[in-house]
Image (cartoon, coloured by chain):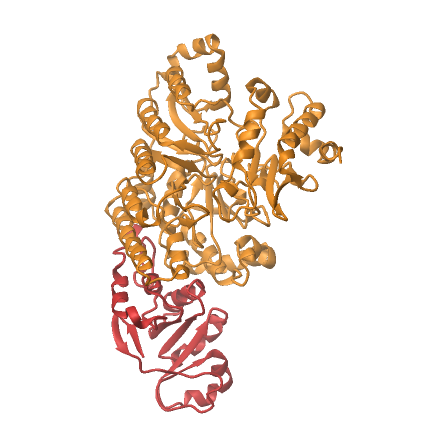
Amino acid sequence: MQIIKDREIIEDQWLHLDEEDADLVIGDITIPLSRWQAEHESLIKHNGKLGLRLSGDDPLEEIIPDLEHFDLIVLVFPAFTDGRCYSFARLLRDRYHYQGEIRAQGDILRDQLYYMTQCGINSFEMADSEYLADALSAFDDFSENYQATALNPDPLYRRR
Amino acid sequence: MYQYDEYDQAMVDQRVEQYRDQTRRFLAGELTEEQFRPLRLMNGLYVQIHAPMLRVAVPYGLMSSRQVRKIADISRRYDKGYVHFTTRQNFQLNWPALETVPDILAELASVQMHAIQSSGNCIRNTTSDQLAGINANEIEDPRPWCEIIRQWSTFHPEFAYLPRKFKIAVIGGDEDRAATQLHDIGLHIVKNNEGEVGFEVFVGGGLGRTPILGKQIRPFLEKKDLLSYLEAILRVYNRLGRRDNKYKARIKITVREHGINHIRELVEAEWVQIREQLELDDKEVERVKKHFTEPDYDLTASDDESFAKMQANDAAFAAWVKQNVVEHKIAGYKAVYISLKSPSLPPGDVTADQLDIIADLADEFSLGEVRSTHNQNLLLSDVKQGDLYALWCQLKSNNLATANMNTLTDIICCPGLDFCGLANATSIPLAKEINERFDDLDYLYDLGDIKIKMSGCMNGCAHQSVGHIGILGVDKKGEEWYQFTLGGSSEEDASLGQRLGRAIPKDRVVDTVATLIDVFKELRYEDELFLQTVRRVGVDPFKERVYADN
């Protein structure tokens, strides 16, 4: 499928595995936290990149020591109104200095892209791919923010 | 007052364009109603019974005369020529067309106004004391801090999809005219033992179905740490607040379920991590404070002798002065309440023509500024005593001089079933009936301060739980009934009212108010106020009489 990454539309290379997908395939895969906890040992030896899927219910702080194993953290938004993972993204970037890809997955709409980007999310699996090209303009909805953000650690009041 | 610079203006202008495109996509079918809903709400637009309702932010209640004229102009061109002021110092247009809202927002942006985050599950408009900066009893003017919070909370990318709405109020001293203990965060400017000025922080206050008073989370916060502490509270709430049940999603429930001590631990642990990054520097504080410097007051204003003379000559003027005019920190100046509680209009409503007059009067008599109040009235903050008579005459001829501030007829009232999609019962017609029943001003003055707050449903927009007399409309098998509470207060002695008893049918509401007043008059000790009497004797004597007949 097509996704937006770093403000470009690209073909996604990742395969998202569920609990039930028994065998690990070759290639770049993401797994839910439960699976990482259960199969830690074998996953580290996986032939391909690893990504971790987190939802707002998951204990973010517990996986911080494992961050080095992941090239991708997928933040799952069950509904676009569930804002918990905005805080996850900021903490991953600002506090835990995670440099890999952070992706928003789930109920992701054009109108959330700007804020998500400011929080440090840099790739997006849109809920509706029909307006993917349109959505690219959302990154420029605003030219400034008052706040310190993941993209600019200095709040506007330091730059005025 | 604060003036936008190019950054502020650009953000508001870009917001208008963003919303214009969102509206276009909704009308073109590219956005579903469900997807559009939070977007329009974050621009102040509700869909109600008859029409959409647009709530416009009035940051901490401050408006210039130019803005007031623009509000009048908008209400004529896009609505029905009147607006409604709310308990959070904002105003609402009751009849705008959804398609024209982007144009209304553009008009507002042209005078540095907006409807950003005036609704939705995000940080709402910050409110304050209408006497900020002119009140001799305050420790420090809260307005610059309100503006700093306004900027921090506007488009905060992390906190746009909170579990529920989030309201902050700031006051400059001990007196509380902003109902701060009923806010998600209440900030009181305080002085500590070392003489330093900072904030006492309360968290978890709120009304609605489960009214709770805010709890102190920090006795003293240094001013430079204001934003980091707010951000810490919001981050903890965003992660921890319940999202499974919207009636349990406010931070008051988070605090109740986890306990204030646990919440404090979480907030403080978060705070130490971000404290340095978000520290406010003096340069920024000074930049904002420059917009709120004291005007050049006329220090000869107190030489005027006409004010005393006119009060002696004109009893109606004297009554208005006694009821609607309050002290100012500068001798010879007064602050003047413009009552939006005349019997002829719903509480909080003001017409476009009246707004134009008020703008003119503000220019002529009060440094060109108008303030809105938590009690749904307006205020002219800096009037020379020698001008009061001329001002009163003009207010009077425009039905703006009802001398009823803090009396039984200065009712806080929500729009109720007449306008609101949530309401179970009407409130405006009852307010009108109460206003008509108690139309003898001398009688009202004799009763002293009595605050009636009346909401048309459990959501409690009129704060009935903290009314001296609270009236809550409920639906019983399709009929409107009203639940009374007594003894609440939203001020520095904040408390929740106690239930009087079973609900009362609509046609008995005004009689019940009259009965409560009769009992008060009998039990009142000298000049005791209603609230004091209720607190002294409890609700039982009132209950016995109200329910005596059946």
All told, the count of numbered labels is: 0
Quadrant of residue A77 in the image?
bottom left
Residue A49 drawn above or below residue A109 = below
B352 vs B220, nearest the viewer: B352
B212 vs A158, nearest the viewer: B212
Q: Is residue B426 visible?
A: yes
B369 vs A119, nearest the viewer: B369
Q: Colour of chain A?
A: red
Quadrant of residue B511 in the image?
top right
Q: Quadrant of the C terminus of chain B?
A: top right
- Identified at 43% across, 61% down, the residue is B273
Q: Residue furthest front?
A: B478
Give x and y (percent) for residue B534: 68, 32
Judging by colour alone, the chain drawn in orange in this rendered image is B
Give x and y (percent) for residue B371: 39, 33
Q: Quadrant of the N terminus of chain B?
A: top left
